[in-house]
Structure formats: structure tokens, C-alpha cells
Amino acid sequence: MITRAEQRRARKRAAQMIRESGIRVNEEEADKIEVVDFGLSHLEIEGVQVLTLVQTERISVKVLVLLPNQTEPEHWHPPVGEDPGKEETIRVVSGTVCFYVQGENTFNQGFLVKDKQKYYTMMHEIILKPGDQITLQPGEKHWFQAHEDGAVMYGFSTVARDALDQFTDPDIVRIVKVVDE
Amino acid sequence: MITRAEQRRARKRAAQMIRESGIRVNEEEADKIEVVDFGLSHLEIEGVQVLTLVQTERISVKVLVLLPNQTEPEHWHPPVGEDPGKEETIRVVSGTVCFYVQGENTFNQGFLVKDKQKYYTMMHEIILKPGDQITLQPGEKHWFQAHEDGAVMYGFSTVARDALDQFTDPDIVRIVKVVDE
């Protein structure tokens, strides 16, 4: 869970980082930025901030923000009914992103979240800088992490059903619980 | 048709406008910018420049550039096999775009291409500024035009099959012919 104050603060930082990256967002959009702690209650360690620009029954466009040294936990997009699962391209706008997928262990520039090593199993490292992008097929496990300057990315995908994403860490709950202080 | 010199020049201008809008593109991407004259051989009047960032069997992300006062002719995205047709969201990054769709005639800030009035039938005007966006359903006729400063837009969509787009102007050919001088 996160508190209203945490949500407000993370939203504000994310909106500022998005604007500094050159992406124009209006106030209404900034107020809708989703602050996701994955039910782990340590937002600045594992979490993500999400601004949804397009969400239809067929496609989704999001701006993803990682705060400095924040990690989005390992997950994948499973098939849903007739949909083979979400196909997603992440394109970096600002900052450096350490991206991890299936393949030879080349882990080098990132770090593992303390006491969570077993929930991070993909160790093939791809460093993405502004203008770089990676396309993930449905079902492909991945996780990613920002350096100390944080990162802003686009997420272009087929229809997003975030609540049905699957995570390696069994403690994760995708629905965010916000509590009043 | 366009000449190699025209293609080169329009590509260079488009790359510059994209970069000035804040979107980072590498040299390889800039060299692939598609310069489209719709077979009308007057690129600066009716035409568009297109940088494709993502093109899979399911989604497409493009950066569309209109040169100053350039018009993208009226067209729509028809069904193809089991696909109901392309669904598309245009989001403006820089410049002002006069967008025209079905609805009450509110034509005001744009202009009609000389001798082509009959091929522009949608007259409901929507003015889009940076950060504004519009979503078009499959089959929905539309055309759009830049003011004197040109415009850069994202086009987020389901799978694009540009060669199958349909145009009101029967003289239009979507496949571009480039000739050596």
C-alpha cells in the first residue's frame, strides 16, 4: 500500500520528469499518473509510475517513469482468451535503463533488490539509452531498472490488461491500495 | 513521382523538425524517413513524411511530419480480412494541425488545396496543438493540414497496411515512385 502523500509526491516527481524529457502533458493527464507499488509497500525500491495516453480495446500507449534506482519487478504478459498476450515495445526518452530478458547472463550495470534475488531470474542485460528500444513478445519475462537519474520511457503495446500481468514474486499484487494517512 | 533530390531534401527537413520537436532519432532511423507524395507529384502541397518506429503484425508507431502548409489528403483505413481496419490515435508533438473528420461543417482555419475541393469532403474542423490527440475508428474518413510552421505528430495504431488505405482522390497512388534526375 501507499499513502495519499506518497502517491501525490511520486505523481508530481513523475510529471516533472516527463516534462523535462520533452513530452508535453497537460494537467488533467498529470493528475491521472498511476503510482504503482506492486503491493510491496516500498515504492522507491520496487515500483513504477504510469501515464496512460491511449487505452482502447486494441492498443495502449503509456509513458513509464522510473524514479532514481527504482526497479520494475520481473513479470510477463500472459495470453488472455483469444489474445496471445500483450506485445510491447519500450522506447527510452530520457535516462538510462538496465533491461533484463532471457539469455546468457551478462548482468553487469544493474543491482539486485535486497532480499529479492530469487524473484529476479532474467539476467541477460541490455542497456537502453534515449532513442533505444526493445520489443517484447507475449509471455517473455522481463524486468528493468533506472540508474541514479531515473528514466522516462514510452510503452507502445497491444491492449493492456495490467491486472492480469504475472510476476515472479508471489507477494506482488498489481492492484494498488492507497490509504489515507 | 518525386526525384531523389526532393526525397533527400524532404527527409532532411523532416529529420530536423522531428529533432527540434524533442523526439530523439538516430541516423539510421532518419535515413529511413519515408517521403510520400501520394503519386500527385506536388509533394509540398499534398504529401507527408513518415518515420516508422514500430511495425509489427499487431501494432504500429509512426512519427508523421507535415512540412509548412502541407496537406495529407482525405483517406480512411478499410477492413482487411479479419482485421476491422486500422484504429489510429494522432497526438501532436509540435506545430498546429487542422484536422478534419465527419460532422457539422466548422471549416475555418484551414484552406482547401487548389482545384482539389471535391476530394476534401470532411469539413468538421478540430484544431490540435502540442499535447492534443484524436482517435480515429476504422473506416473514419479524415484529412489534416499544417499551418506555416509545419507539424510533428505521433501516429499510434493497430497494424498499418498503408498500401491498402483508401483515398477520396482517385488520382492518388500510395506507392511512391522515386526517379533519378
Image (spheres, coloured by chain):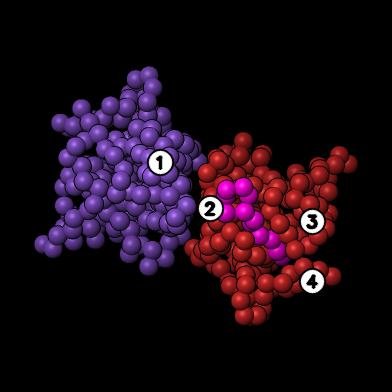
Chain colours: A purple, B red
Q: Which residues are magenta?
A: B68-84
Sooner in the amino-acid sequence: mark 2 or mark 3:
2
| Chain ID of residue with mark 2 | B
Residue B70 placement (x, y as % from top left): 72, 62
| Chain ID of residue with mark 3 | B
Q: Nearer the viewer, residue B18 or A106?
A: A106
Q: Which mark is residue B118?
A: 4
Q: Are marks 3 and 4 on the same chain?
A: yes
- Viewed as shown, does residue B114 lie left or right of A79? right
What's the residue type where badge 3 is placed?
A: Ile
Provide the residue designation for mark 1.
A85
Q: Are marks 1 and 3 on the same chain?
A: no
Res B138 seen here: yes
Residues tagged 2 and 1 counted as in contact (Cβ below 8 A): no
Residues tagged 4 and 1 counted as in contact (Cβ below 8 A): no
Residue B143 placement (x, y as % from top left): 67, 65
Q: Residue at x 38, y 63 (%)?
A: A29
Mark 4 element type: helix
Q: Which mark is residue B172?
A: 3
Residue A40 placement (x, y as % from top left): 17, 44
Mark 1 element type: loop
User: Principal SS element in the magenta part?
Assistant: loop
Magenta stretch: residue B138 in it?
no
Provide the residue designation for mark 2.
B156
